[in-house]
Amino acid sequence: MSIPDSTHSCWQKLASNSVPGFTPKQLALQLLFTRLKNETMSVRDKAAAIHAFFVKYEKILTAEMNQLRDLHQL
Amino acid sequence: MNTLLSIPETKRLIESGAALAVAGSARALSALPRGNWIGGTSHYFIGSDGAVKSDDRVFVTDLGAFGPVQLAVYGPNRIEQLTTEAPEHGFSVVVIPAASESLRRFAQRPYTSDLFLKAVVGWVAGVDLAELRTAHAQVVDGRSGKFETDAVVAAHVKLPPEKMPAISIVNPFRAAAADIVQFEEPAFSATHAQVNGSRTALADFLVKKGYAHGRLPLIGDYSGAAVNVSIQAVECVSGRVDFYAPVFPGISYRLAEPVADYAKAFREALQGRETPHIALSCNCILNYLYGELEGKRLGNTLGPVTFGEIAYQLLNQTMVILEIV
């Protein structure tokens, strides 16, 4: 499964914590999510940060991608 | 290679041009020739025969086996350069002295876009527990042989495109369900915290709960990752509580439940991990001490026993593992 484009709605939903049931498994993504929650950045910038992480670490984010598919976000 | 070696064995490796991360006593590190290595003081190790204390062997990780290595040293005023200079595709191994300004600044780095995009892993150099009050943790730049008490030594390793760093943690503790502790500002110490929503004198709370001994950490919930912050001291008179890593606002912390058998907890958590993928690991001196790990095997993760662990950020009482997949 390829990573959706940066304009896909899933990134903004993840950035605004509006994907109930999504539980990241990779440590770096867990730390990133937590850090972003507490940053005063725009949702758009947070979404871009999450998208960049998924693009770079696609190989080890299979579980997270499957979750997004199962949660009907893709 | 990720193993305990004698000093002559390590000398030969350095003289062959290998790029290494080395953990050992100051005396052992001083005996090594100049070369392409970084190091830090550590007297305790998880070896293939179990956890040991040794002043005449060193723990060696061959980083050159994974790709080109570039070494760097960052003083406390240049910490932010670390992730800037880290490779776009690879990982960075860092060693930082305990109780240093460099460690304090590393642990409280502000968010930047590459903070979690670049894999930073490593450990905090320590001292012999018998010399806790007199000795200073040190790091070494092997190129110059220079020891530092306040700097970060780093090895930036580029990986081939088909390889990927994966940093994970093994936490032997479980969070107790009761009592949510939250802090108002990022700090290595606090006098008050919100406990279950009420502003509370933290030292009194920890004493009342039986946690003033510092053996059990607070566990922060980072989107499902259990991140430990160890309690260094509880000052009942001043009310100040010191931590070995900073606490942060916006994180819910819980008290850790006691662990009956640390070695078993680690072994169970490590079942199924494939040794060839493990590039390096480290484990906490507090686990070694309170878990009475000396002589015990913890599975196939070998490495130094350290005064703090680094997996993107500073952690406590945790095993950190870097796998190349």
Image (tube, coloured by chain):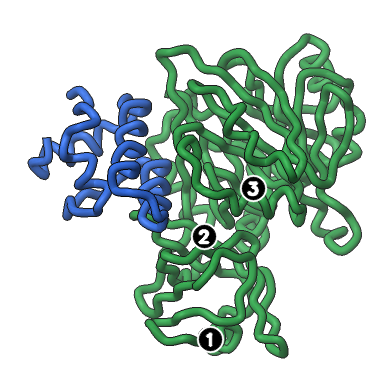
Q: Which residue is mark 1?
A: B205
Please give the chain letter of the residue carrying mark 2.
Answer: B
Q: Position of residue B147 (x, y in %)?
A: 87, 37
Q: Which residue is mark 3?
A: B106
Q: Which residue is mark 2?
A: B228
Above or below A59: residue B186: below
**Front-most of residues A46 and B201:** A46
Task: Please give left or right for residue B62 compared with residue B113 in the image.
Answer: right
Residue B128 image label: none
Residue B198 visible in the current orientation: yes
- Which chain, by letter, is blue? A
Mark 3 element type: helix
Q: Are marks 2 and 3 in contact (CB under 8 Å)?
A: no
Q: Amino acid at mark 3?
A: Phe
Q: Earlier in the sequence, mark 1 or mark 2?
A: 1
Q: Earlier in the sequence, mark 2 or mark 3?
A: 3
Above or below B250: residue A52: above
Q: CA distance from mark 3 to mark 1?
A: 29 Å
Q: Amino acid at mark 1?
A: Phe
Please give the chain letter of the residue carrying mark 3.
Answer: B
Above or below B155: residue B79: below
Query: Mark 3 Cα within 10 Å, few/some/many (few <14, many 20+)?
Result: many
Q: Are marks 1 and 2 in contact (CB under 8 Å)?
A: no
**Front-most of residues B31 and B233:** B233
Q: Position of residue B266 (x, y in %)?
A: 49, 50
